[in-house]
């Protein structure tokens, strides 16, 4: 099709969205989940959850406060007294059952996910598979949480290190991956022997409730997983409780850098363990000599996943001058094939942005760049025929450091291309940010691959690869992107501590 971006007609879209969203979702719940009970907020307050595409109300859930959170923490504490004593094998069996139920209910989880997050079905499918695989992974890791016997310097002492669960942990999660951000944390926490209180994002609490329901069905005991829902205005008070309650041992957070810093300081008073996975500003470098077709495919996958609302999305495309025009032309061609539309339609590749404030932020950055002289090669505005949250896939050239899109995490389907001359210059631009989550580069020079991989100031690097998330690998950042690792065997480290046992022996 010759059109720049293929839009389906407005009326057809709206009708299709309404039909799909009115389908019954068996796993959709309208109460919070504490100690295996479906509970309302003590105050009786509720808040609405919207579909980002149809903008209709999908559900209403409890708007809980710090007192409700305290009850959940107490339930988790009581449960820890027994769950913390189970063997790795016992926990493994239950986690495996949870994984199997997640797989059995995959279709429904995908629909729920797409409905509340607005991500296209194919992407919701990918997220649910990834999220499920994390429970599978941690069901296996639960049996491999080992200690160590250290060689002693003296005959009368034996030194043994064992790993113990932290206790009650609070898990605060974002809306961009409503399933996987919970399973990546809760899988590791439960495998380690911790119990948890989850506070999902206000935009996407339904997946969290569905996951908890299936965990209970799988045999996770009462109080081991609790879900406290609350609207945005109450998040600060609930968040403070989840960090500072004396019965909470640690917290794991994924979200914005600003909120992460606040939680970090909240945790200081009680010297609580904390793991933070915060915003990124990923460079995507294309060196001359790279396989440009592969680089373009990687760029599309990396940038447009979840409409660019991913903390490891490529944010700044740095392209060496002699391949700049060719790369940009190839990328533009592929971008024209991205279908913007209803997330519940199988033909859609890009859905709406999550909410109006996110949409305003993305379009604000695009307008700022245009006003300061950027060239719009493609897109550049909202697709208002589809609603208020659909942003056209946008390609911006001639960007410079004075523009917001050059410096800040865009979190939208906007590609920003910058030309560079030398490897040194590319690295200097790539590392000139406070963030350090993921970085990507394409090269066919093995020496350059090793050199640049080591020189990038990020916690993760994709080398000739744009999709890097997998349960087996350690996910996490450096600098203001946070600390702590998720997935991999390192995921368990965040929810356990090393205890040193010194055995004093009689003289032999
Ligand atoms: P985003 O800007 O992408 O929504 P946030 O960091 O604001 O990212 O949100 C991530 C999670 O943090 C959500 O669950 C949100 O409700 C929660 N949150 C927001 N503000 C606070 C706060 N002050 N204390 C604790 N949690 C918060």
Image (cartoon, helix red, strand yellow):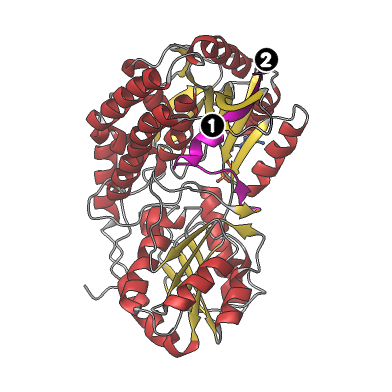
Q: Residues within 10 Å of mark 1 (few under 14, many from 20)?
A: few
Q: Which residue is mark 1?
A: 148
Please identify the quarter of the rendering in which residue 171 is found: top right
Mark 1, ligand 1, within 8 Å: the answer is no
* Range of residues picked out in magenta: 480-508
Q: Pinpoint residue 245: horizontal percent, then vertical percent.
A: 69, 20
Q: Is residue 210 above or below residue 113?
A: above
Q: Examine the structure image and report whether residue 502 is included in the region drawn in magenta.
A: yes
Q: Pinpoint residue 388: horizontal percent, then vertical percent.
A: 45, 53
Q: Nearer the viewer, mark 2 or mark 1?
A: 2
Please identify the quarter of the rendering in which residue 64 is found: top right
Q: Which residue is mark 2?
A: 506
Q: Secondary structure at mark 1?
A: strand
Q: Is residue 414 left or right of residue 479?
A: left
- The outermost residue toward the front is 508
Q: Examine the structure image and report whether residue 103 is included in the region drawn in magenta.
A: no
Q: Is residue 338 above or below residue 322?
A: above
Distance from disc 2 to disc 1, alpha carbons, whole Å, reads: 22 Å
Q: Residue at position x 47%, y 77% from top?
A: 447
Work out which quarter of the rendered image holds the N terminus and state it. Answer: bottom left
Return the residue nearer the eye: 346 or 127: 127
């Amino acid at each position: 099709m010759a059109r720049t971006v293929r839009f389906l007609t407005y009326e057809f879209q709206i009708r299709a969205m309404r039909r799909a969203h009115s389908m019954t979702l068996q796993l959709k719940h309208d109460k919070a989940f504490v100690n295996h009970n479906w509970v309302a907020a003590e105050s009786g307050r509720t808040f609405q959850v919207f579909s980002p595409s149809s903008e209709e109300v999908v559900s209403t859930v409890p708007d809980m406060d710090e007192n409700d959170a305290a009850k959940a923490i107490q339930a988790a504490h009581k449960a820890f007294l027994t769950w913390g004593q189970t063997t790795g094998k016992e926990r493994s069996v239950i986690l495996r059952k949870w994984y199997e139920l997640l797989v059995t209910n995959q279709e429904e989880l995908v629909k729920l996910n797409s409905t509340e997050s607005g991500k296209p079905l194919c992407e919701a499918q990918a997220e649910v598979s990834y999220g499920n695989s994390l429970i599978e992974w941690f069901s296996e890791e639960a049996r491999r949480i080992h200690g160590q016997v250290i060689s002693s310097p003296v005959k009368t002492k034996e030194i043994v290190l064992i790993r113990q669960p932290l206790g009650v942990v609070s898990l605060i999660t974002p809306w961009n991956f409503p399933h996987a951000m919970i399973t990546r944390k809760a899988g590791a926490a439960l495998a380690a022997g911790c119990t948890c209180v989850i506070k999902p994002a206000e935009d996407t609490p339904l997946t969290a409730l569905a996951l908890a329901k299936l965990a209970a069905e799988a045999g996770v005991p009462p109080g081991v997983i609790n879900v406290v829902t609350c609207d945005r205005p109450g998040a600060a008070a609930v968040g403070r409780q989840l960090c500072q309650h004396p019965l909470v041992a640690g917290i794991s957070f994924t979200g914005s850098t600003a909120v992460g810093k606040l939680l970090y300081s909240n945790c200081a008073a009680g010297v609580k363990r904390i793991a933070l996975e915060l915003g990124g500003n990923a460079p995507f470098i294309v060196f001359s000599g790279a396989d440009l077709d592969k680089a373009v495919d990687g760029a599309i996958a990396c940038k447009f996943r979840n409409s660019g609302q991913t903390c490891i999305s490529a944010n700044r495309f740095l392209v060496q001058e002699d391949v700049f025009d060719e790369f940009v032309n190839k990328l533009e061609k592929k971008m024209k094939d991205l279908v913007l539309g209803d997330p519940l339609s199988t033909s859609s590749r890009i859905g709406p942005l999550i909410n109006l404030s996110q949409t305003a932020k993305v379009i604000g950055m695009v307008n700022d760049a245009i006003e300061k002289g950027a060239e719009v090669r493609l897109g550049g505005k909202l697709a208002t025929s589809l609603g208020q949250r659909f942003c056209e896939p946008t390609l911006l050239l001639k960007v410079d450091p004075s523009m917001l899109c050059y410096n800040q995490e865009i979190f939208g389907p906007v590609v920003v291309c910058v030309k560079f001359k030398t490897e040194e210059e590319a690295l200097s631009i790539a590392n000139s940010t406070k963030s350090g989550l993921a970085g990507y580069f394409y090269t066919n020079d093995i020496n350059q691959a090793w050199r640049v991989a080591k020189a990038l100031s990020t916690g993760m690097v994709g080398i000739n690869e744009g999709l890097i998330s997998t349960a087996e690998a350690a996910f996490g950042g450096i600098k203001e992107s946070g600390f702590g690792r998720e997935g991999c065997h390192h995921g368990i480290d965040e929810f356990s501590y090393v205890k040193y046992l010194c055995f004093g022996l009689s003289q032999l």
